[in-house]
Amino acid sequence: MTNRVQAPREVCRQVLATPRRLVQDPYAILGTAAGAVIGGVIGLQIGGGGGRRSYAAWRDRWWTGGH
């Protein structure tokens, strides 16, 4: 018994490609800011206050005109 197998063939054709638009989230900045604030609050609660000293040093330097 003999089985016949067709050789694979390549089919080329032109298709219309539509460019995709970048999805922009209008709430990205708000979400980033909220995440930073929430992370800071949680870090202060868990971290034992070392961040408070760092913040105070940053605040004293930047908000009093020491930059």
Image: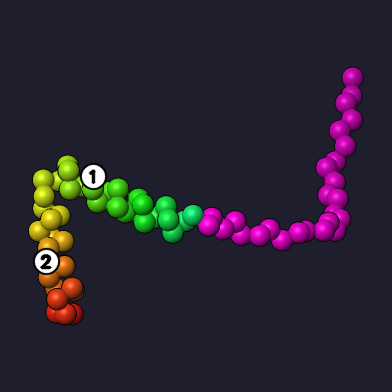
- Please report the residue visible at 82 percent of the width from the left and 58 percent of the height from the top: 16
Q: In which quarter of the image is residue 13?
A: bottom right
Colouring: rainbow
Residue type marked 1: Ile
SS majority, magenta: loop
What element does badge 1 sit on?
helix
- Please report the residue visible at 83 percent of the width from the left and 42 percent of the height from the top: 8
- Label 1 crowd bin: few (<14), some (14–19), many (20+), radius 10 Å: few
Query: For this view, does 23 lie left or right of residue 49?
Result: right
In the image, 67 versus 64, the foreground residue is 64
Residue 2 in the magenta stretch? The answer is yes
In the image, 3 versus 45, the foreground residue is 45
What element does badge 2 sit on?
helix
Asked if the residue under mark 1 is in contact with the one under mark 2, i.e. CB atoms within 8 Å, the reply is: no
- Please report the residue visible at 14 percent of the width from the left and 76 percent of the height from the top: 64
Q: In which quarter of the image is residue 24?
A: bottom right
Quarter of the rendering occupied by the N terminus: top right
What residue is shown with label 2? 57
Q: In this view, does 33 lie above or below 43?
A: below
Q: Which mark is residue 42?
A: 1
- Label 2 crowd bin: few (<14), some (14–19), many (20+), radius 10 Å: few
- Please report the residue visible at 24 percent of the width from the left and 51 percent of the height from the top: 40
Residue type marked 2: Ala
Quarter of the rendering occupied by the C terminus: bottom left
Residue 49 in the magenta stretch? The answer is no
Q: Earlier in the sequence, mark 2 or mark 1?
A: 1
Chain part drawn in magenta: 1-26
Residue 25 drawn at (x, y percent)? 54, 55
